[in-house]
Amino acid sequence: MNNAESSTVVSGLAWFKSSYSGAEGGDCVEVASGTTVVHVRDSKTNAGPMLAVSREAWAGFVGLASSERYV
């Protein structure tokens, strides 16, 4: 995790909500791509805690989560 980036760049990030999020709200995840990390947060708590993971780790997670094994 890159604390320096996640604490200083957060305000300038473009956040994207999951395509699986419905219009009625509920459990939603947003992500924003930084220069070296991907930021993840709860869309209902914009100012709350945020997770920052390497781009490689995020790519691995998305690949695993979208594999037929877990769909």
Image (tube, grey):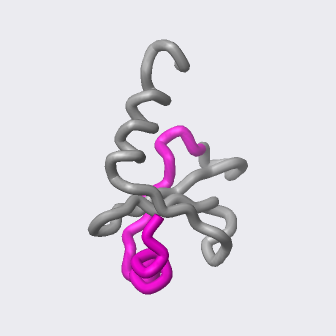
Q: Is residue 6 above or below residue 1?
A: below
The residue sitting at 41% across, 62% down in the picture is 32
Residue numbers of the magenta segment: 1-21
Q: Seen in the image, is 11 located left or right of residue 27? A: left
Residue 50: x and y in percent read 58, 66
The residue sitting at 61% across, 72% down in the picture is 46
Asked if residue 53 is among those painted magenta in the image, a careful observer would answer no
Q: Nearer the viewer, residue 35 or 48?
A: 35
The residue sitting at 27% across, 68% down in the picture is 35
Q: Seen in the image, is 43 located left or right of residue 12? A: right
Farthest residue in the top direction? 69
Q: Seen in the image, is 17 located left or right of residue 37? A: right
Exactly how many numbered labels are in the figure? 0
Q: Is residue 21 above or below residue 33?
A: above
Residue 71: x and y in percent read 53, 19
Farthest residue in the left direction? 35
